[in-house]
Image (tube, rainbow, N blue to C red):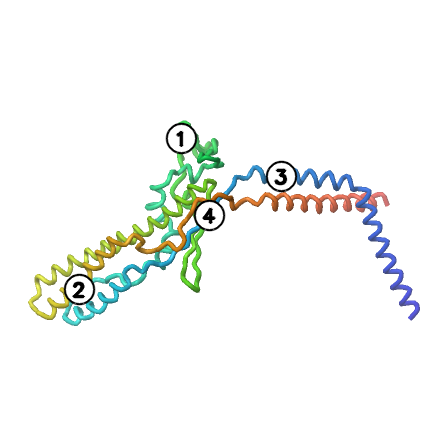
Amino acid sequence: MQETFNNNHLDNLHSELDLLEIFSVLFRGKWKIISLTAFISIIGVVYSLSLPNIYVSKTILAPANASSGISGALGRYAGLAGFAGLAVPSAGGESNSAKATLKIKSLNFFENNILPNIFLPDLMAVESWSLPNSLVYDESIYNNNTNTWIVDPSNPNKKEPSAQSSFSRFIGNHLNLSQDKKNGFITLTIKHQSPFLAKEWAELVVDQINILYRKKDKSESEKAVRYLNQKIEITNLSETKEAIAELLKEETKKLALIEAKQSYVFDYVDPPSVMETKSEPDRAFICILFALIGGMLSVLLVLIEHYFFKKTKE
């Protein structure tokens, strides 16, 4: 029993001596620790200051469900027309909002609806933004004075970014889209060095998706009207004529709704704004992180140096 107590006492004493030795080593190497920590902290400050400010424009959207009521009526009359022997085209009863949410993040939508409406260097070559509203472009990518792209020596045939590379940049660096499953609201955010462009692009995405589905549904409805007019001219059954007349009435209402409603797929719950304060980068956090990393590395270096040379000498 006494022997066990003595062993434990010796172990505790040895641990205390080890800790004292470590503190002694760190104290002797304090100037190395301070110097290395300060050096890495300065690197962190320089790095954080080199990062451009990023502004985020956020908008909250609600599905407009523009054609839900009309579609229900069309469905009822389509059943009547089917009973009379007609195959009536679909009225597009399914809400467009679910499909539009996926469409926004597609290459096809970007290439046909976003890319023609933006200045490509604003997406691919912006270096920084400053007040009142001026952009600085990366001269290694784009020459703003001559409005020309800088040729990449590794690919001399490529004069400007392709649609696919531009799409990757837009989706990866600028656009974010999420949906609240509880209430169905959709949050769309655009990041950019310029707060004005962030707001402009957020509005552009919403406007273009509304325009796209308005045109799509208008085209389908106009085709349905032409189809029904052809059918009403060739049928002699009064029941069928009545069904077609009701269908034409509902399609006419749908066309009027498509033309009149501005927010066809999405309504603004909270429209985008030009933000006065940046969202990124968090320079204070970056500086603190570099200082912590510098401190840990310098302590580790002093300890490794001491024990490595100690063992080498022994």
Q: Are marks 1 and 2 in contact (CB under 8 Å)?
A: no
In terms of image quadrants, where is residue 25? top right
Q: Which residue is mark 1?
A: 148
Mark carried by residue 71: none
* Within-10-Å neighbours for mark 2: few <14, some 14–19, many 20+: many
Query: CA gap, disc 3 to disc 2?
Result: 69 Å
Separation of residues labelled 1 and 2 (CA atoms): 55 Å
Mark 3 and mark 4: span between their CA atoms?
Answer: 26 Å
Q: Residue 168: x percent and y percent?
A: 43, 46
Earlier-in-chain disc, 1 versus 4: 1
Q: Quadrant of residue 4?
A: bottom right
Q: Label 1's element?
A: strand
x, y percent for residue 27:
81, 44
Tell me which amino acid carries mark 4: Gly
Q: Camera-side residue: 204 or 148?
A: 204
Q: What residue is drawn where x is 38% and y is 38%?
A: 119
Q: Who's the residue at 23% across and 54% down the image? A: 218
Q: Earlier in the sequence, mark 3 or mark 2?
A: 3
Residue 78 position in % (x across, y down): 20, 67
- Which residue bears the numbered disc 3? 45
Q: Secondary structure at mark 4?
A: helix
Count of labels in the image: 4
For the residues labelled 2 and 4, say whether their Cβ atoms are less than 8 Å apart: no
Tell me the residue that label 4 is attached to: 172
Circle nearer the N terminus (3, 4): 3
Between 151 and 74, the residue placed more toward the observer is: 74
Q: Which residue is mark 2?
A: 247
Which quadrant is home to the N terminus?
bottom right
The 10 Å Cα crowd at callout 4, few under 14, some 14 to 19, many 20 or more, is few
**Residue type marked 1:** Thr
